[in-house]
Each structure stands twice: as structure tokens, then as C-alpha cells.
Amino acid sequence: MRIAAALMLALLPLCGADELETAYNNLKAAEAKKDAADVVKWAAETSRLAREAAAKPEPASEAEKSSWKSRVDWAKQVDTYSEYALYALALQPVGAGNIALLVEALEKQNPRSQYLNQLAAPYLMALNQSNRAADIVPAAQRRLEHDPENEDLLLVLADGYLSSKQPDKALAMAQKLTAVMEAKARPEAVPADVWEKKKAGALGRGYWIAGIVYADQKKHAEADKVLRAALPYLANDAAMMGPAAFYLGIANYEMGKASKNRAKLADALKFSEQSGAIAGPYQAAAQKNAKSIRAELPPASKAR
């Protein structure tokens, strides 16, 4: 997006246009130097002056209306460009601290900017890399109000709520995440292989979080359903596969014991053995569960 120099010069007679032109030129100079602090400074000043110019009342004279409309249209374009300048630099390798600075300036300047939704993932990553982990969930909460189907925000919130022991919120975010990713088409700008990898990761994590919450709530049927849905995405992730198989073992044992369903008990044994083979915090308990379940199953039931 560029403002035509000829058009800008033609509109300089507007009151305050010299100030706006100066601010705009300073913003362009800061962009060229990739100076994040100066871009923030001049984007804010350019936006302020542009909004003042755009708010000038319509003149009574018909002869002046045409030039007034052109000046207002130009000022609005310049205001939008001030947002674009912040966005464009935030996508460049200017350092995590500067990326956070640029995005927060854009959010302050216009919380509904068309560019903010596209900056959600790099902004959250920048916060993490800037040792501002405590700001990640509040930032994601703010942005979700404006972009409720952003998978990056939903994933961050699902994880954040699970870590902070807010299971109901974690479950709601995980369910929203999986629903969004099941229905969402690949964005045109994203390569197919990149999208499929992202989609698989989000679905696996979403189903896994929901399953962990259900398991903790002893909702065995629900845990069994979503954790089974997660399994195809967890094959190469022992950190998630271990607890997923562990809780699947418990869920199927409890359902099998309650209904005297031998197939469920056999699945409970299979999942417990699977978890018991994965090094990690669930391994010893899973091995103990497998031993107990194996003792309850007659030989014929164990051979499947």
C-alpha cells in the first residue's frame, strides 16, 4: 500500500497538511531504517494528524466540497498506512521485543485494525521469547474478542487454562479449537503441507486437552471418545501419548467393569500396556494398572 506523492502534494493546501506530510515522511524514513521505536512514534503521530484532517467538517461552499472530499479520503488512506507500517515491520526479523512493541502500538492505535488478526501468532511468540509469558493469556483473551475463530489464540488459551487449573475454560477452548480446525479451509497463502501439519497439531492438542479434562472429571465415556480421536495425531509425541494412553486405560477399565464388558477391559489392558512402555511420569502407574487388569481377565479374553 502506497500513497501517491503527486496526490499528496496536490492536497497540501489543506490546513495542517504540512504537519501530516512531515509526519508521514518521517514514518517512511523510520520504516526504511527498520527503526521500531521511531516507526511506533511516527505511526502514532501520523494517525493522530490524519484523523484530525479526516474529521474536518464539510464546507458549505460547493466549490470547496470536491477538494475537501479528496483531502478527507487521503487522510483516511494515510491513517490506514500508519497501521500497515507497524504491521509490516512486525513481520520482519527485528527482534522479539520490537515485535511486541509494534503489535502493542498497533493495538493501542486501533484495536480493530485489519492487520492485528494476522499478527496473533508472531505476537504471542514474541511475548514468550521476551520473557513475558504472564502476558500471553491476557493478550490472547483480548484478541479473541475480535477474532473468535483464530486457531492460534484458541490453542494458546486452551493450554493456558489447562496449565492454570481452569478446566472448564480449557475444555471450552479445546472444543472450540477442534470444531474450528475440522471446519476451516486452508488459507490460500498457506502451503498445503504447512497447513496439514498445523491442522494435525491443533486437532491433536485440542482433543488431548479435552480428554485430559474429562478424565480428571471422571467422565469416562467422553474421555474415551476424544482421546481416541487424538491418538492418530500423537504417534510421534510421547509427552502426550503417555498420558493419553494412561487415561484411556482408566476410562475403558471403569466402563468395562461397570458394564461387565470384556472388550472394554481388554482395551483397558492394551492402553495401559502402551502407556507403561513410554518413559515418563505415567509409566509406573500404567504398568501397575496393566498388571491389575491382566489379573482380572481370563486367558481367553487377553488374546485378541
Image (cartoon, rainbow, N blue to C red):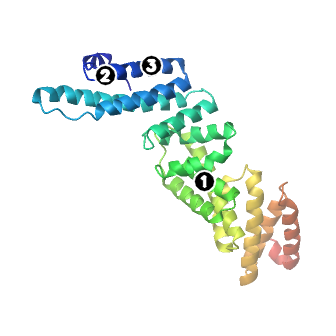
Q: Residue 157 carries which label?
A: 1
- Which residue type does callout 2 highlight? Ala
Q: Mark 2 points at which residue?
A: 17
**Distance from Cα at disc 1 to Cα at disc 2:** 44 Å
- Which residue type does callout 3 highlight? Asn
Q: Measured along the vertical axis of the image, is residue 296 above or below residue 73?
A: below
Q: Which part of the image, by quadrant, shows the C terminus?
A: bottom right
In front: 126, or 208?
A: 126
Q: Residue 263: tell me if it is visible.
A: no
Which mark lies nearer to you, 3 or 1?
3
Q: Measured along the vertical axis of the image, is residue 187 above or below residue 297?
A: above
In screen coordinates, is 109 left or right of 256? left
In front: 74, or 193?
A: 74
Residue at 56% x, 27% y is: 92
In front: 286, or 89?
A: 89
In front: 221, or 176?
A: 176
Mark closer to the chain start, 3 or 2: 2
Estimate the x, y position of residue 220 in percent, counting from the top left.
Answer: 69, 73
Dot 1 and dot 2 residues touching (CB under 8 Å): no
Residue at the far front in the pictured view:
15
Mark 1, secondary structure of its residue: helix
- Which residue type does callout 1 highlight? Leu
Q: Mark 3 points at which residue?
A: 26
Estimate the x, y position of residue 294 in percent, counting from the top left.
Answer: 86, 73
Estimate the x, y position of residue 111 in percent, counting from the top left.
Answer: 45, 43
